[in-house]
Amino acid sequence: MKAGFHVAAALALFAALGTPASAEAQEIKIGEINSYSGLPAFTEPYRKGWQLAIEEINAAGGVNGQKLVVISKDDGGKPADAVTAANELVSSEGVTILAGTFFSNIGLAVSDFAKQKKVFFMAAEPLTDAVTWANGNRYTFRLRPSNYMQAAMLAEEAAKLPAKRWATVAPNYEYGQSAVAVFKQLLSAKRPDIEWVDAQWPPQGKIDAGSVVQALAASKPEAILNVTFGADLVKFVREGNTRGLFEDRSVVSFLTGEPEYLDPLKDETPEGWIVTGYPWSAIKTPEHDAFLKAYQAKYDDYPRLGSIVGYTTMKSIAAILAKAGSADTDKMIAAAEGIGVDSPFGPITFRKIDHQSTLGAFVGKTTVEDGKGVMTDFQYRDGAQYLPGDAEVAKLRPAE
């Protein structure tokens, strides 16, 4: 009787001790960090996108029989807070993969953390070229088309304009600085006759739109490159419309065709800006139709570009894990280099040379329909067509 009791107690103890380890073995933890409180217009749809992807992945049996679990943190738009969050996720929560970030300076901070701690990091949204080139490292991959890629798409259209006198306006931090520099480089290479007559650098999120518009007008440009977004963009457009800045002037604009930035403009949306964006209601492909149907069924809402980014981020991670057969960092890196992934925009590849995905962007013009800003005359530009070759990247990216 006594012996039987001891055996039963030992078995019960063994089962109790074994359960968490067994449960843990059935899960792969992903640590996700983003500026939810800093830019909800983009990051809330982004969260819906990745949640839909995780739901689909786990409903289909997970990855290699393991469920994906996402532990999400808000970095508040601060690089130091993002690094603190990354450290907590890795050291306390036991995540084996980091993902996310929006602002370029935060993406760079988390990328550096990933390099120091040897953790796989899928940078979802930051656009600065430094993520995959100047500050690139073997642990970091990036999903969204970079500043270089979007600048190359826009410069292709800008070069066709008769305008010779150009001015720029961009937020004064890593993303804005990087976007202006690469656009100027690419457009000047196509059009050596162009003169850059003014550059306005308002602080991100704190634009004094009246003085910016006044300064731009004073320089008498024939065309303007705009890199502002979010609330800054709304203020800039409103002041520009009021003061006639955009009349008889071409404007080329990063990101403005994304619904998260067009929607707040409503009927104030300027006519004819050349933009990158996401005309969600007018895309007619099987891949996008399937995504749109699933997204609207779950949320009773239309997707924004953030939704595409969040969804494809987690689908990419799942594809990498499946190919690696493990959440081991080195195996994931080897699997990710050159991997092909399906996205709502069609097949993409993560390049081995620089870990940049070939996800593209839609390029078109802004207009107003039924009191809302939309994209018209748009085409999808495959990101693979707007990236430099291996020899050029080898000069831009440090050897490891």
Image (spheres, rainbow, N blue to C red):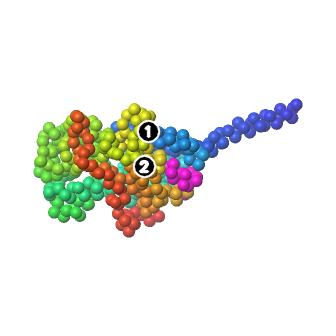
320 drawn magenta: yes
User: Which residue is pictured at 29% across the width and 57% down the height?
Assistant: 152
Percent x, y for residue 254? 28, 49
Question: Compared to 334, does 176 lie above or below?
Answer: above
Whole-Å distance between the Cαs marked 2 and 1? 14 Å
Residue 388 in the image, given as x and y percentages of width and height: 35, 63
Lateral position of residue 164 relative to residue 96, left or right: left
Give the amino acid at mark 1: Ala
Residue 343 circle label: 2
Q: Amino acid at mark 2?
A: Ser
Residue at position x 65%, y 42% in the image: 21
Q: Which residue is mark 1?
A: 294
Q: Is 323 or 23 nearer to us in this picture? A: 323
Secondary element type, mark 1 = helix
Give the side of residue 168 with respect to residue 125, left or right. Answer: left
* Tally of numbered discs: 2
Q: Quadrant of residue 307?
A: top left
**Earlier sequence position, callout 2 versus callout 1:** 1
Residue range corresponding to the magenta coloring: 317-330
